[in-house]
Image (cartoon, helix red, strand yellow):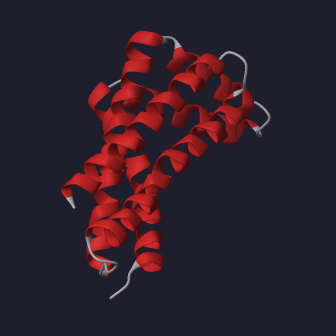
């Protein structure tokens, strides 16, 4: 099990790293909304290795059988590897590669919010200021971004375990 987790978790890490570098190069070309779509898509693509890792474990290492619990455990650990890599990459990006990203991102979000009625705009402005403050702490930023990927990975792990379980 450990070998499968490390192998497919590594594939997920490599994929999310490669896709993140590609996204970094596109950051000035696309707007925030498209950037978020591309970002979430890259998370899902890198987490597809959860399915393939569980399938490999079942077929090649466990004689064609895997319980729901075993499959879920394999998927969770593969997801954990990708999520930790993404959290670290995101902190590196906003701290070292593009230190103005958070300011630019929130300025763009604030600009989008200007179409709201005045009272709603003020509420959204306060929400954005609070989020910006929270994301300025690298540890909180790492945790939030890692958990975002992990939750997606957990959902994929659940679905994959349901599909691939075989007694």
Q: Residue at x 80, y 34 (%)?
A: 115
Q: Residue at x 44, y 19 (%)?
A: 93
The number of numbered discs placed on residues in the rendered structure image is 0
Residue 153: name its quadrant: bottom left
Q: Is residue 116 left or right of residue 8?
A: right
Q: Is residue 28 above or below residue 80?
A: above
| Position in image of residue 25 (x %, y %) | 61, 17
- Residue 30 seen anywhere in this rendered image of the structure: yes
Considering every residue shown, the one lying at the far right of the view is: 115
| Position in image of residue 36 (x %, y %) | 62, 37
| Position in image of residue 83 (x %, y %) | 36, 44
Q: Is residue 44 left or right of residue 85?
A: right
Residue 77: name its quadrant: bottom left
Q: Is residue 121 above or below residue 154?
A: above
Q: Is residue 83 left or right of residue 61?
A: right
**Closest to the observer: 23 or 101?**
23
Q: Is residue 91 above or below residue 73?
A: above
Say which quadrant the N terminus sits in: bottom left
**Closest to the observer: 132 or 116?**
132
**Closest to the observer: 12 or 141?**
12
Considering every residue shown, the one lying at the far bottom of the view is: 167
Considering every residue shown, the one lying at the far left of the view is: 2
Say which quadrant the C terminus sits in: bottom left
Q: Residue at x 30, y 50 (%)?
A: 80
Q: Residue at x 37, y 43 (%)?
A: 82
- Residue 130 seen anywhere in this rendered image of the structure: no
| Position in image of residue 19 (x %, y %) | 54, 31
């Amino acid at each position: 099990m450990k070998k499968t987790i490390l192998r497919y978790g590594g594939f997920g890490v490599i994929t999310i790293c490669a896709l993140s570098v590609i996204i970094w190069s596109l950051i000035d070309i696309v707007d925030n909304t498209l950037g978020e779509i591309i970002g979430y898509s890259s998370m899902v693509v890198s987490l597809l290795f959860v399915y393939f890792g569980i399938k490999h474990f079942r077929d090649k290492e466990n004689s064609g059988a895997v319980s729901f619990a075993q499959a879920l455990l394999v998927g969770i650990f593969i997801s954990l590897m990708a999520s930790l890599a993404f959290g670290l990459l995101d902190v590196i990006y906003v701290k070292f590669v593009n230190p103005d990203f958070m300011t630019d991102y929130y300025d763009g979000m604030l600009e989008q919010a200007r179409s709201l009625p005045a009272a709603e705009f003020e509420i959204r402005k306060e929400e954005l200021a609070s989020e910006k403050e929270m994301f300025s702490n690298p540890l909180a930023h790492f945790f939030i971004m890692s958990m975002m990927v992990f939750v997606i990975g957990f959902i994929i792990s659940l679905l994959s375990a349901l599909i691939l379980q075989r007694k």
